Image (spheres, helix red, strand yellow):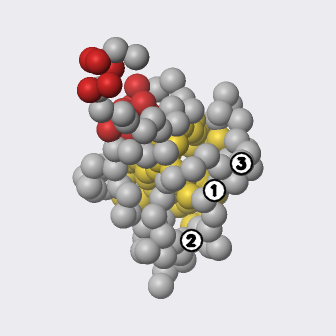
């Protein structure tokens, strides 16, 4: 050990992000997140349920677990979230969205739920739609993430949220 080595501050290294995504690496190194991974999703309409001319806001969020996806409590924080402006035709073909999950620790395969919903409007919520919740009349779908980061989680928008 040289004198220069002795004067260098020692830093505690954090585990590296589980994904090769540059955004996941930035989250792990600069935000101090212990684990970050990319979760690939594909969202589709199960049947024609939207008028074809309008614009819609698609929101996708992943969670550790949920009791009921139709009523996500405001205090439950998603691991990841994203929003996109879409059309009914886009959803009929399928929309691919990569979510960057930020977690305190790595979770085992099969632990996780992905919720997606679509509602009228543009993607004008806060940047990542982390606080968004489904509104009455929203078309939504739920899928479990299987832990296989090489394949996509497929979510079918096949349920309608009833009014409050």
The percent coordinates of residue 112 (x first, y second) are 65, 54
Which residue is rendered at x = 34% and y = 44% of the image?
A: 31
Which residue bears the numbered disc 3? 108
Residue 6 vertical position relative to residue 120 in the rendered view, above or below: above
Of labels 2 and 1, earlier in sequence is 2
Mark 2 surroundings within 10 Å by alpha-carbon count, few (fewer than 14), some (14 through 19), many (20 or more):
many
For discs 2 and 1, the disc positioned in front in the rendered view: 1
Question: For the residue labelled by badge 3, is the local secondary structure a helix, a strand or a loop?
Answer: loop
Indicate the position of residue 153 as horizontal and vertical percent values. 65, 41
Q: Position of residue 6 (x, y in %)?
A: 32, 25
Cα distance between the residues tagged 2 and 1: 12 Å
Mark number, residue 32: none
Question: Quick check: marks 2 and 3 in contact, CB under 8 Å?
Answer: no
Alpha-carbon distance for marks 3 and 1?
13 Å
Relative vertical location of residue 43 with respect to residue 158 in this rendering, above or below: above
Left or right of 140? Residue 57 is left
Please tell me which of labels 2 and 3 falls first in the chain: 2
Residue at the farthest top position: 2
Query: Which residue is denoted by mark 1 in the rendering?
Result: 113
Instruction: Return the disc, 3 or 1, that comes first in the chain's sequence.
Output: 3
Q: For the view shown, which residue lies furthest in the bottom direction? A: 164
Decide which of 132, 137 is in the foreground and name it. 132
Residue at image location 29% in from the left, 18% down from the top: 3
Q: CA distance from mark 2 to mark 3?
A: 25 Å
Q: Are marks 2 and 1 in contact (CB under 8 Å)?
A: no
């Amino acid at each position: 050990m040289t004198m220069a080595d002795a004067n260098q501050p020692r830093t505690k290294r954090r585990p590296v992000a589980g994904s090769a995504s540059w955004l996941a690496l930035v989250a792990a190194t600069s935000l101090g997140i212990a684990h970050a991974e990319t979760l690939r999703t594909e969202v589709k309409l199960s049947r024609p349920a939207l008028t074809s001319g309008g614009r819609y806001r698609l929101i996708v969020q992943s969670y550790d677990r949920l009791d009921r996806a139709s009523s996500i409590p405001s205090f439950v924080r998603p691991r990841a979230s994203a929003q996109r402006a879409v059309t009914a035709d886009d959803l009929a073909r399928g929309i691919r969205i990569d979510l960057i999950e930020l977690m305190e620790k790595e979770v085992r395969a099969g632990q996780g739920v992905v919720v997606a919903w679509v509602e009228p409007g543009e993607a004008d919520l806060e940047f990542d739609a982390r606080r968004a919740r489904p509104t009455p009349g929203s078309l939504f779908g739920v899928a479990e993430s299987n832990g296989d980061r090489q394949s996509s989680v497929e979510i079918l928008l096949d349920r309608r949220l009833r009014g409050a």
